[in-house]
Image: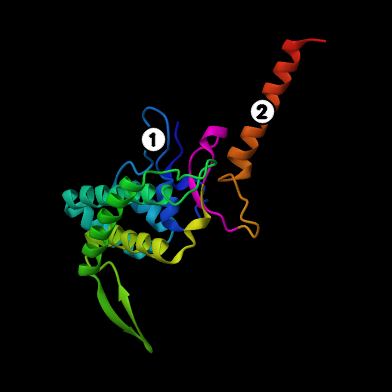
Amino acid sequence: MPLDVCQLPLVGGHPVLDLVNTRERGGASPHDFLSDSSALLRWSVRVGVISDAEADEIGRAWRDEPAAAHAAVAAVRDIREALHLVLLATITDADGGTAGDPVAAGAALVALHQRWSGAAARARLVLDSSRVRLTYGTVPAMVVPDRIAAAALDVMLTADLTRVRRCPVLEGGCGWLFLDQSRSGSRRWCRMADCGNAVKARRLTERRRAARTAGP
């Protein structure tokens, strides 16, 4: 049985990279952990997109208007998949090329810009002490997708995208994305305790099996 969305390890180094990792990558029918509006709401609280109090208000808005809940989930999934395409295009593979499709990434950037433009249109400027800030999430039903659209823009504009990595699928990894924040920049696995150790254990088993097959 798949993990609940709130049991997923947060390995991305930024909430929207953890968002990208709420969908399995690879396989014929990858599992989507953002199965419904309830899962999205719980995940959003867990990663700090919204507070508990905001979750109560959003939950009421979504219960009163189920179509808005479905629209919010669809919007977040669209942002997730578009961001995945963009980030893949920033990753250099072993042959020196990109892990993604630059053409698809360009189209994804257009889609992300449209999502952010809608979020910005619903945002408002707030005077906070001696500074003015742009506050996203003024419409309860759209708070979650609007803040995620803003966070996606933030990571694309401010993060060092040369540090984006993908847990190596060809070596037995899961394909999750993460920001390599290690000093050496040499992190390879989403979590050594998960994929890294699993691959090492599998390779050890294969070597032992090969040794038994070869015989004395």
Side of 10 where 53 appears, left or right: left
* Residue at image point 51% right, 45% down: 96
* Residue at image point 50% right, 57% down: 162
Mark number, residue 203: 2
Between 124 and 6, the one lying in front of the other is 124
Between 34 and 172, the one lying in front of the other is 172
Callout 1, which amino acid?
His
Residue 196 is inside the magenta segment: no
Measured as percent of width and height from the top left, residue 19 is found at 40, 51
Side of 182 where 61 appears, left or right: left
Mark number, residue 31: 1
Above or below 160: residue 3: above
Span colored in magenta: 166-181
The quadrant in which the C terminus is found is: top right
* Residue at image point 21% right, 65% down: 139
Q: Residues within 10 Å of mark 2 (few under 14, many from 20)?
A: some
Side of 215 where 174 appears, left or right: left
